[in-house]
């Protein structure tokens, strides 16, 4: 199920996204990639916080 939606962005943001986009890559693909990178970054940060907790066991908070 695909639906086209408009996401309002400033001209500066559009230019930045355009600069990040690879030739042939759609904006949808770019945004999916950026979202996936963010989720990975958040997960890595969570693991660092757990490891810095000092319990020695990452599953114990």
Image (cartoon, grey):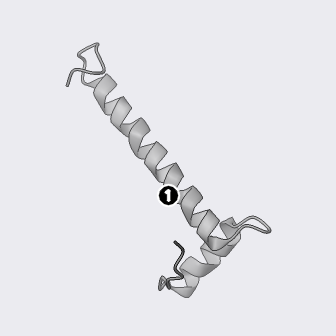
Query: Which residue lies under the disc numbered 1?
Result: 35
In the depicted structure, whether residue 42 falls above or below residue 34? above
Q: Residue at x 24, y 24 (%)?
A: 53
Depth order, front residue of 7/16: 7
**In this rendering, position of residue 10 left or right of residue 16:** left
Which quadrant of the view contains residue 20?
A: bottom right
How crowded pointer 1 is (Cα within 10 Å; few <14, some 14-19, many 20+) is rated as few
Depth order, front residue of 17/28: 28
Residue 7: give x, y in percent of width and height.
48, 82
Residue 15: give x, y in percent of width and height.
63, 79
- Residue that protrudes farthest toward the top in the picture: 56
In the depicted structure, whether residue 26 falls above or below residue 54? below
Q: Residue at x 52, y 79 (%)?
A: 3
Residue 18: give x, y in percent of width and height.
67, 74
- Residue that protrudes farthest toward the right in the picture: 23
Which quadrant of the view contains residue 21?
A: bottom right
**In this rendering, position of residue 20 left or right of residue 45:** right
Instruction: Label 1, secondary structure: give it.
Output: helix
**In this rendering, position of residue 35 left or right of residue 42:** right
Q: Quadrant of the C terminus?
A: top left
- Residue that protrudes farthest toward the left in the picture: 61
In the depicted structure, whether residue 16 falls above or below residue 55? below
- Residue that protrudes farthest toward the front in the picture: 1
Q: Residue at x 80, y 68 (%)?
A: 23
């Amino acid at each position: 199920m695909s639906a086209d939606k408009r996401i309002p962005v400033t001209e500066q943001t559009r230019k930045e996204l355009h600069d990040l986009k690879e030739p042939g890559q759609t904006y949808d693909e770019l945004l999916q990639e950026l979202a996936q990178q963010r989720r990975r970054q958040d997960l890595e940060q969570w693991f660092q916080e757990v490891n810095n907790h000092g319990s020695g066991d990452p599953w114990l908070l």
